[in-house]
Image (spheres, helix red, strand yellow):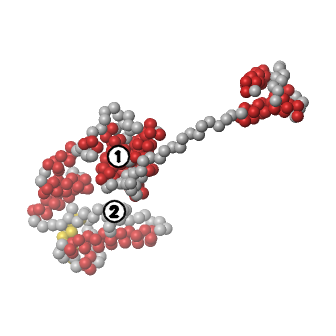
């Protein structure tokens, strides 16, 4: 019966390719298909063909026997280590996008803390380091048995590097490349290193050629002077220009906000001077300036020196 149905199917495929207007559908073999044609006669050749195709499809599917049941997928071996918390996952993603040089230290911290990678990290971490034998082995150590299990079922997560990783390299941080500009800082004594850093910060803020150099030179000659630098965006210092706004409908509101920001800066600078024990100053400025209320902090401007 099975051979007869298979032959009958091939004959119907031939009729379908040629068209029922050129060839009549074949006579169904004895059995259920023949009974179907008798019990439900169709008027046109195309209807008879479609009826027999449907009946033959049902007969073929009904004749299939179930195969042996596939074995259940064995779970990975138990790993008693606790998984990393969600905060660690967020940290890894931030490191991956912003500070990839810190990823080795992060992975070693997971291993040394007695934890294992959270399941959602196993695949991306293994896939990220497929071409690096040392980092892939380190990630596999952090992933535990789940990592080996994932590689078994997804071979493309396996390491593709030819050279094997050494156990010493897995447990050590790689030596980082040092920017040439940092070499003098690393080789200098602590006091000298602090001075180098301070000079670099000053040049980054004020530039390499700035009139502040002349002011500092004059202070050195007088053997007295204080420079108060309020970094924009720090506590009490606004992120905006100090120019007065152009006349608009919101002028009063903007002017009030400008005065409030100026007062915050004046108060912060005056508090620094007061903490230094200064009560009278010669103000060095580009123009004459009057700070109303400054004396409320116990500080008096004796005179203003115009640059």
Query: Relative to 63, does residue 222 appear above or below in the rendering?
Result: below
Q: Which of 236 and 83 lies nearest the eye of the viewer?
A: 83
Q: Is residue 99 visible?
A: no
Quadrant assignment for the N terminus:
top right
Quadrant assignment for the C terminus:
bottom left
Q: Position of residue 143 (x, y in %)?
A: 38, 48
Whichever of callouts 1 and 2 sits on the residue coming sooner in the sequence is: 1
Residue 158 vs residue 191: left or right? right
Q: Based on the displayed image, in which of its 4 quarters is residue 157 positioned?
A: top left
Q: Position of residue 25 (x, y in %)?
A: 82, 24
Q: Secondary structure at mark 2?
A: loop
Q: Residues within 10 Å of mark 2 (few under 14, many from 20)?
A: few
Q: At x 25% / y 73%, what residue is drawn?
A: 271
Q: Residues within 10 Å of mark 1 (few under 14, many from 20)?
A: many
Q: At x 33% / y 49%, what residue is drawn?
A: 107
Residue 247 vs residue 188: left or right? right
Q: Mark 1 sits on what residue?
A: 141
Q: Mark 2 sits on what residue?
A: 233
Q: Which of 228 and 250 lies nearest the eye of the viewer?
A: 228
Q: Based on the displayed image, in which of its 4 quarters is residue 62 positioned?
A: top right
Query: Relative to 112, does residue 256 appear above or below in the rendering?
Result: below
Q: Which of 270 and 149 lies nearest the eye of the viewer?
A: 149
């Amino acid at each position: 019966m099975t051979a007869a149905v298979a032959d009958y199917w091939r004959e119907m495929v031939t009729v379908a390719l040629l068209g029922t207007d050129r060839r009549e559908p074949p006579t169904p073999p004895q059995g259920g298909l023949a009974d179907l044609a008798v019990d439900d006669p169709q008027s046109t050749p195309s209807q008879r063909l479609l009826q027999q195709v449907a009946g033959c499809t049902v007969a073929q599917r009904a004749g299939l026997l179930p195969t042996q049941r596939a074995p259940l997928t064995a779970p990975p071996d138990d790993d008693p280590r606790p998984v990393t918390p969600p905060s660690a996952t967020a940290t890894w993603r931030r490191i991956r996008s912003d500070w990839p040089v810190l990823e080795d230290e992060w992975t070693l911290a997971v291993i040394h803390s007695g934890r294992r990678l959270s399941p959602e990290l196993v695949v991306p971490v293994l896939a990220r380091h497929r071409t690096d034998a040392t980092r892939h082995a380190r990630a596999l150590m952090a992933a535990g048995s789940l990592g080996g299990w994932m590689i078994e079922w997804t071979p493309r997560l396996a390491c593709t590097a030819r050279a094997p990783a050494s156990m010493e390299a897995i447990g050590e941080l790689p030596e980082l490349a040092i920017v040439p500009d940092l070499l003098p800082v690393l080789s200098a004594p602590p006091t000298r290193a602090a001075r180098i850093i301070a000079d670099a910060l000053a040049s980054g803020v004020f530039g390499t050629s700035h009139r502040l150099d002349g002011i500092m030179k004059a202070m050195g000659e007088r053997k007295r002077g204080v420079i108060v630098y309020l970094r924009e965006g720090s506590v009490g210092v606004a992120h905006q220009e100090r120019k007065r706004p152009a006349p608009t409908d919101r002028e009063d509101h903007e002017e009030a906000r400008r005065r409030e920001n100026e007062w915050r800066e004046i108060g912060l600078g005056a508090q620094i001077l007061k903490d230094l024990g200064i009560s009278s100053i010669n103000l060095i400025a580009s123009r004459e300036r009057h700070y109303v209320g400054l004396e409320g902090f116990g500080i008096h401007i004796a005179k203003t020196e115009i640059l």
